[in-house]
Amino acid sequence: MRTFKLSALWLIAATVAFTGCAGKQHKGIGSMEAVVQSIAITMHSAESRQMAAADKRFAAMFDYIEANDLSSLGDGRYDIDGDNLFLIVVTAPMRTAEEAPLEAHDRYYDVQIPLAQSETFAIADRNVCHSPRGEADATNDIVFFDDKPQRTVTVAPMQLLVLPPQVAHAPMIGEGVQHKAIFKIRIAEN
């Protein structure tokens, strides 16, 4: 029996128009705003349908969410469409804002879904991040920054936070242990 209630599912999307690393343009999901902002939409809203219509990987993600009880999945990687779309489920201790560095990804959207409890994310426009913490890890598609976030967003259980590559984010801020789902959606390049 599935306990994931779609009527309670909201999507909080950090949206921006962007140019990726080395000036490469990325093909995104429809018309993104030019500033980082969060918008809340329901699973079956016009906005979520627009995202799904603009990119088949987002459509496949929404289909996967509808068909599966994310809360019952164990830790690990779940392939949905190979390296184009996959899910990582993790259970880990939360941390303080000071312990959580900003991170960003070049090749993937992160769609993060807290499952056990609310989770706070520190967020910054990647254009203002000028202090990388070491070299980018191309294999794992991650770079960390020592820059300060511009704001925080708290996401309730069973909500989604969509983080495009131009948004640096520090996840897992809070207390206790979090069980969460992270969908990785490959950026389509022009």
Image (cartoon, rainbow, N blue to C red):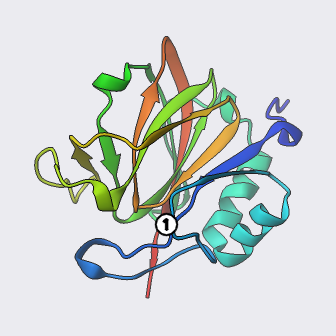
Badge 1: residue crowd in 10 Å (few <14, some 14–19, many ≥20) = some
Residue of label 1:
84
Q: In the structure shown, which secondary structural element does the residue marked by tag 1 occupy?
A: loop
Whether residue 131 is visible to the viewer of this picture, yes or no, is yes
Above or below, comparing residue 81 to residue 142 in the picture: below
Amino acid of disc 1: Asn
**Percent x, y of residue 148:** 29, 40
Tell me the quadrant of the picture where the N terminus can be found: top right
Q: Is residue 5 left or right of residue 51?
A: right
- Which residue is the extreme one toward the right? 7
Residue at 57% in and 55% down: 37
- Which residue is the extreme one toward the bottom? 190
Residue at 43% in and 20% down: 94
Whether residue 141 is visible to the viewer of this picture, yes or no, is no
Q: Is residue 95 left or right of residue 69?
A: left
**Percent x, y of residue 97:** 37, 25
